Image (cartoon, rainbow, N blue to C red):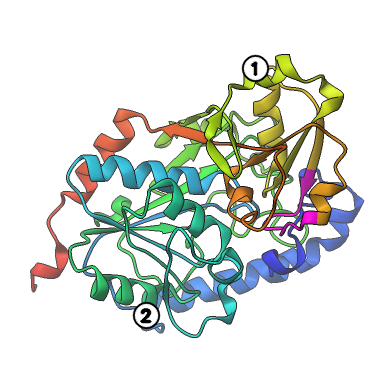
Amino acid sequence: MARSFFRKAPQFWEKRGPTALLLWPLSWVYGLVLRIRKLIQDLGLINRQAAPVPIIIVGNIRVGGTGKTPIVIALAQRLAQLGWRPGIISRGYGSSTQTQPVQVRSDSDPMQVGDEPVLIAKRTHEEFPIWVFPKRQQSIKALLKQSPEVNVIISDDGLQHSSLSRWPAREGGRDIEFVVRDGRGEGNGFLLPAGPLREPANRARDATLQTESSSSNKSGLSEEYFEGRRTFALVGTLDAPYQLHHPENTQTLAQISEQYLPDQISAVAALGNPQRFFAALQKQGVTGKWIPLPDHASYTQDFFNGIQSQCILITEKDAVKCAAISDERIWVVPMSLNLPNDLIDWVQSILQRPDPHRYNL
């Protein structure tokens, strides 16, 4: 529902104005459906098969990008450094035409498997097996059959995927549910469609990953609600841009800001929250024309030909969709994310718990 109708977040999601209040009855119905679904799960009426390895879900309760994919990449890399063998699953935006799970490579078609899984494969140099399919349980089976050495699976999104069985850490299990939260917070605090929330703001979670400080909070929950629970602040940094089809050519953002005037620079971002990318550029001293596009938007040569700038900056997520684009003006801005040691230590302590499937009570 959210992906189909709200690829670009409407402004009324950020405050409780007339439009949001008019749509609130539909949000109440949506909330009722969520409560009924949870009751069915609690009664055990849905057959859910537990995975033989721990599952780490990196998700959000707000529609639109909050910065999950860089976290998935960083988490997989840190766990691998510690001796774990991670695998990654994703729904794969655009993969609805698939009839079975598909393994993602760095040269996979983003239109078929999704731009984010391809980005993960490229950034990690295919170090980890990555599988996509809307039915995540089938992706897990395919991944473990192909790569039986995997001993932990990271799910890019999936908090609301009811058939994905989990025993969360807060209840004594080895599975972890992360809620990623950015600077927009919970908006007006309403559920879809009056607000941006897939689930209530006070949804249970094992930890909150805060990618930005929240500038406002109208969800009815104080900031102390999140700070008083397990919360980790994550800080991302923009690295030196590289030329789209000549990645060996790099220059710093400072060099770009010195070489080009603001009216000669354009930045394009097809993200759930493109303003975060533009704000990060501004913090690095880069100013220009900002071109926000709906999340997962595709690109054509004509689109870039129509941009009257000498330098065009795009994200790595957008770059995976530009393989057929020929334009020397395009520079890709990578982002790095360092996870705090206390977060990794806590994750390890959960993963090292005894395997509940080895014991019969």
In the rendered structure, does residue 294 fall within the stretch colored magenta?
A: yes
* Range shown magenta: 292-301
Disc 2 marks which residue? 44
Closer to us: 15 or 339: 339
| Quarter residue 252 falls in | top right
Residue at 63% x, 56% y is 321
Quadrant including the N terminus: bottom right
Give the SS element for disc 2.
loop
Quadrant including the C terminus: bottom left
Q: Position of residue 287 (x, y in %)?
A: 77, 23
> Would you say residue 35 is visible in this rendering?
yes
**Residue extending furthest right?**
18
The image shows residue 113, relative to residue 260, as above or below, that is: below
Q: Earlier in the sequence, mark 1 or mark 2?
A: 2
Residue at 21% x, 69% y is 52
SS assignment for the magenta stretch, majority: loop
Disc 1 marks which residue? 255
Closer to us: 88 or 18: 88
Front position among marks 1 and 2? 1
Closer to us: 186 or 267: 267
